[in-house]
C-alpha cells in the first residue's frame, strides 16, 4: 500500500479516535503518531520518544488496531516505533513544558492557544506528565487580583508579587509556608499566571511534591531518568507544592536536591510551599533543609477577623445574590479555621438560597451551617489547654509560661504544648510564644518527648488521651 493511502486511512481512524477520547487527549498522546508503512499485516507508527512509544503501546494500540481493521481488513496489528519525525524534536532534544500545557486543552476551536506549541513540537507529551497522573492544572480563579491581602499574609503576598514581576530572580528559592487553607496554593498559581501574562516565553512547571515523586518513580521504572532530569532542569520556573510530602523519602529527596542545585546554578527560579518552615520539616535531609532556607522564607499566619471579613466581602461581590453584612460578619467571627472552609460556608448558604428560592438571612445561615458552626464552636484555644492541663496536674497556670524547669512543671508544660499542636491550627512558633516566648524547637522537643513517653508509659498515655478527649469535647 502506498504512503498516500495509509495516510488517508489514518486520517479516518484519527477522526474516530478523536470522537471517542476527545480532542484534548488525542492532541496530547496521539497527534505525534505518523504512519510509516504496512507490511505483513502490521502498520508501523512512528513516535518521537521512547516514553510515548511505551504509553501508546499499552493504552491505545489495541483500539487503533480494531478501528484500523474496520477501515482495512489487512491490518492485523499496530507496531509503535521510535523515529525522528519531521517537525518534531528527537528523543535526545531538551525537554520543555510551556505553561499552556498546565492549564487545560492546548487547542481552542482547532487552533493552538496563544503561547502554546503544538504537541508534536514539545516533549510535554511524556506519559508521566499526563494531567490526571502528574501535571496539575492552574486554577483561573487563583490570581493576584483575587487574593485578599491582610497582615497575616502581606509578606508572602509581597514576595510572590516580587518574583512574578521581576525580570531577574530576586531570591531563590521563595519558600511559602503555613497551615491548611491559608492561601499558599493560591499564591503559587497567581505567580504562574502573572509570569505567563508578562513573559509568555518563560517555561513554568507547577506540580505537587507527590506528583514529582511519582514522575521520578516512573522514570526509574522505564529506565529513562535522563528524560526526567532534562525535563525538570530545563524549565525557567519550577514550582513544587506541599514539599513536606517527600519527607522521609530519601531517593526522591536525592533527585530533588540535584534538580534544585542545577536550577539555582542556572539562576532559574524555584518556588516551594509547605505546611512548616524548612527548619521544622522532620524527615528532610539537612543539606536539603538548608537549601530550602537559602532564599526568602515567608510565613502565612492564621487569618484575623478583619482578613476573613475582607475575603468574604470580596467573594460576596462576585455572587448573584445579596448577602446581608450581618451574615458576613457572623461567618467571619464563627469560622476561623481557614479560608477554604470559610468560602465553602458562603457557597453553601448561597446554594441553599438559590435552590429553595429564599433570601439569605441570619436564621437560614445558622440552620444551613448548623454542623459546621457546631464543629467550630468545639475548637479549643491554647489558653484553655493550659488551664485544663494545669488543673489536671494540680499546678498553677502561670507555671505554663514561667522559667521553672522542675519535672513537676516541665512535664505538664510539654503535655500542654503537645495538645496545642494536636488540637489547634497554631504554628510551632505561635505555640512557643504562648508558653513564655519559647522557641519553636522547644515545642518540637516537647511533642517528641510526649510521644515517646506515651509509647512506653501506659498510664501517662491514658492521662494525655483523657485530656485530649475532654478538650476536644
Image (tube, rainbow, N blue to C red):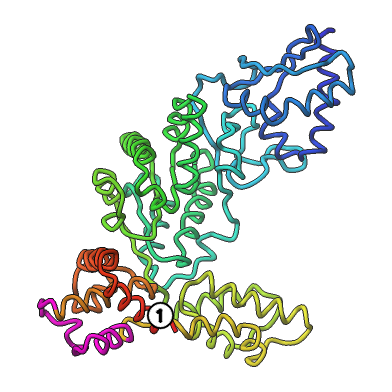
Quadrant holding the N terminus: top right
Occupied quadrant, residue 279:
bottom left
Residue 467 in magenta stretch: no
Residue 153 drawn at (x, y percent):
39, 68
Residue 252 drawn at (x, y percent):
39, 39
Which span of residues is magenta-colored? 384-407
Judged by its main secondary structure, the magenta piece is helix
Occupied quadrant, residue 124:
top right
Pick the front one: 219 or 318 = 219
Residue 432 relative to residue 138: left or right:
left
Circle 1 Cα neighbour tier, 10 Å, few/some/many (<14 / 14–19 / ≥20): few
Specify the farthest residue to the front: 458
Up the image or down, 187 lies above or below 337; here it is: above
Residue at the image point whose x is 20% and y is 82% from the top: 400
Pick the front one: 50 or 107 = 50
Residue 247 drawn at (x, y percent):
36, 49
Residue at the image point whose x is 29% and y is 64% from the top: 455
Number of numbered discs present? 1
Is residue 305 among the parts visible in the rendering? no
Pick the front one: 248 or 192 = 248
Q: Secondary structure at mark 1?
A: helix
Amino acid at each position: 500500500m502506498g504512503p498516500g493511502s495509509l495516510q488517508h486511512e489514518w486520517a479516518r481512524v484519527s477522526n474516530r479516535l478523536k470522537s471517542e477520547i476527545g480532542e484534548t487527549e488525542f492532541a496530547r498522546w496521539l497527534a505525534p503518531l505518523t504512519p510509516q508503512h504496512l507490511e505483513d499485516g502490521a502498520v508501523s507508527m512512528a513516535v518521537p520518544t521512547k516514553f510515548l512509544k511505551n504509553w501508546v503501546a499499552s493504552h491505545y494500540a489495541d483500539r487503533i488496531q480494531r478501528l484500523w481493521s474496520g477501515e482495512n481488513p489487512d491490518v492485523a496489528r499496530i507496531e509503535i516505533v521510535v523515529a525522528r519525525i519531521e517537525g518534531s524534536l528527537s528523543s535526545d532534544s531538551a525537554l520543555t513544558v510551556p505553561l499552556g500545557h498546565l492549564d487545560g486543552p492546548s487547542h481552542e476551536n482547532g487552533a493552538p492557544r496563544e503561547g502554546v506549541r503544538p504537541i508534536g513540537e514539545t516533549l510535554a507529551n511524556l506519559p508521566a506528565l499526563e494531567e490526571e497522573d502528574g501535571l496539575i492544572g492552574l486554577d483561573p480563579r487563583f490570581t493576584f487580583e483575587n487574593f485578599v491581602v491582610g497582615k497575616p499574609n502581606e509578606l508572602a503576598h509581597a514576595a510572590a508579587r516580587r518574583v512574578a514581576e521581576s525580570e531577574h530572580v530576586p531570591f531563590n528559592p521563595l519558600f511559602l509556608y503555613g497551615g491548611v487553607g491559608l492561601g499558599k496554593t493560591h499564591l503559587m498559581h497567581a505567580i504562574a499566571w502573572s509570569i505567563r501574562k508578562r513573559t509568555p516565553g518563560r517555561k513554568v512547571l507547577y506540580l505537587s511534591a507527590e506528583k514529582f515523586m511519582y514522575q521520578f518513580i516512573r522514570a526509574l521504572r522505564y529506565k529513562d531518568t535522563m528524560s526526567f532530569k532534562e525535563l525538570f532542569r530545563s524549565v525557567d520556573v519550577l514550582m513544587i507544592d506541599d514539599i513536606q510530602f517527600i519527607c522521609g523519602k530519601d531517593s526522591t529527596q536525592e533527585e530533588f536536591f540535584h534538580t534544585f542545585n542545577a536550577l539555582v546554578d542556572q539562576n532559574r527560579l524555584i518556588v516551594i510551599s509547605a505546611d512548616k518552615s524548612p527548619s521544622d520539616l522532620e524527615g528532610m535531609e539537612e543539606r536539603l533543609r538548608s537549601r530550602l532556607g537559602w532564599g526568602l522564607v515567608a510565613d502565612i499566619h492564621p487569618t484575623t477577623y478583619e482578613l476573613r471579613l475582607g475575603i468574604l466581602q470580596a467573594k460576596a461581590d462576585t455572587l448573584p445574590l445579596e448577602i446581608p453584612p450581618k451574615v458576613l460578619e457572623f461567618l467571619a467571627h464563627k469560622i476561623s479555621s481557614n479560608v477554604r472552609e470559610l468560602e465553602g460556608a458562603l457557597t453553601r448558604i448561597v446554594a441553599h438560597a438559590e435552590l429553595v428560592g429564599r433570601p439569605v438571612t441570619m436564621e437560614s445561615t445558622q440552620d444551613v451551617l448548623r454542623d459546621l458552626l457546631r464543629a467550630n464552636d468545639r475548637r479549643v484555644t491554647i489558653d484553655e489547654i493550659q488551664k485544663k492541663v494545669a488543673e489536671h496536674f494540680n499546678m498553677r497556670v502561670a507555671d505554663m509560661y514561667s522559667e521553672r524547669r522542675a519535672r513537676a512543671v516541665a512535664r505538664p508544660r510539654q503535655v500542654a504544648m503537645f495538645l496545642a499542636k494536636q488540637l489547634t491550627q497554631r504554628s510551632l512558633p505561635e505555640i512557643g510564644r504562648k508558653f513564655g516566648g519559647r522557641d519553636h524547637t522547644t515545642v518540637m522537643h516537647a511533642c517528641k518527648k510526649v510521644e515517646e513517653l506515651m509509647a512506653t508509659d501506659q498510664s501517662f498515655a491514658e492521662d494525655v488521651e483523657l485530656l485530649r478527649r475532654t478538650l476536644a469535647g
